[in-house]
Amino acid sequence: DAKTTQPTSMDCAEGRAANLPCNHSTISGNEYVYWYRQIHSQGPQYIIHGLKNNETNEMASLIITEDRKSSTLILPHATLRDTAVYYCIVRVVGTGNQFYFGTGTSLTVIP
Amino acid sequence: GAVVSQHPSRVICKSGTSVKIECRSLDFQATTMFWYRQFPKKSLMLMATSNEGSKATYEQGVEKDKFLINHASLTLSTLTVTSAHPEDSSFYICSARGGGGARTYGYTFGSGTRLTVV
């Protein structure tokens, strides 16, 4: 699976949009981009995933560049409960394909 | 949605004893389950992959005789830490592949088990 690079930490003001970048320059054509987050001492929580089109759900939006070498997770109106470590993972969809976690971005939402 | 239940959430055991952690998929059949460990302020490290009815596949550097994995049914996988030592103290998390919809190709994670070996 392709490796990802994320900033170690970010701050965001409560109520503002949080934009979390991820570089995956070695992504291959059949690899999806997944985002998970982990709130302290809990298991990771699925946020969103996509292949090449931008995606939106009730939690977030995922913007993938045209060359697919990077993506941005957008939390439109960050709340204090969004404080967590956010992981960007790229992997091939299919039976038994593991998730390998990188270091992630620690997002702190500030009141 | 898909739910994975992990038990216990916390356990303290004496050095040299064995501890079993359970991972259950509550509303779907999990064809594949994964076990991770996480040290404080570190990322999740994949330990092993288990498929129902077959032997687990361990990641490089993970001792299969120390971390016994059993996936006897489509809804239950267990991780047994044998002859536990203080350095085995960690946060253990399971995940399961399965369920329906777009998240079928994603994974649902349990809430984790905090193991402390004293």
Image (cartoon, coloured by chain):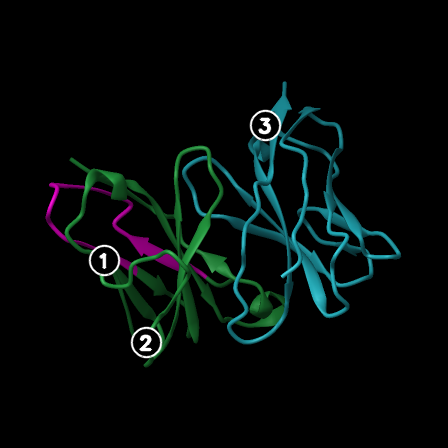
Chain colours: A cyan, B green
CA–CA distance in space, label 2 to label 3 = 43 Å
Q: Are marks 2 and 3 in contact (CB under 8 Å)?
A: no
Q: Nearer the viewer, residue B37 or B21?
A: B37
| Inter-mark Cα distance, 3 to 1 | 40 Å
Residue B24 lies, in percent from the top left, at: 33, 64
| Highlighted magenta segment, given as a residue range | B3-22
Q: Residue at x 29, y 45 (%)?
A: B9
- Would you place residue A32 above or below residue A10 in this image? below
Under tag 1, what secondary structure?
Answer: loop
Which of the two marks, 2 or 3, is nearer to us in this view? 2
Q: Residue furthest right?
A: A66
Query: Which of the two discs, 1 and 2, labels the residue nearer the N terminus?
Result: 2
- Say if residue A74 shows up in the picture: no
3 and 1 marks in contact (CB < 8 Å): no
Considering the image in quadrants, where does the C terminus of chain B appear? Answer: top left
How far from the left and from the top, in percent, is residue A38?
Answer: 51, 42
User: Label 2 amino acid?
Assistant: Lys
Is B42 contained in the magenta span? no
Q: Which residue corresponds to mark 2?
A: B55
Secondary structure beneath label 2 = loop
- Mark 3 — on which chain does it sit? A
Q: Quadrant of residue B15?
A: top left
What kind of element bears circle 3?
Answer: helix
Quickly name the residue at label 1: B66
Which label sits on residue A19? none
For the residues beneath circles 2 and 3, the answer to whether they share a chain is no
Any mark on residue A80, and which?
A: 3
A107 lies left or right of B31: right
Q: Quadrant of residue B80?
A: bottom left
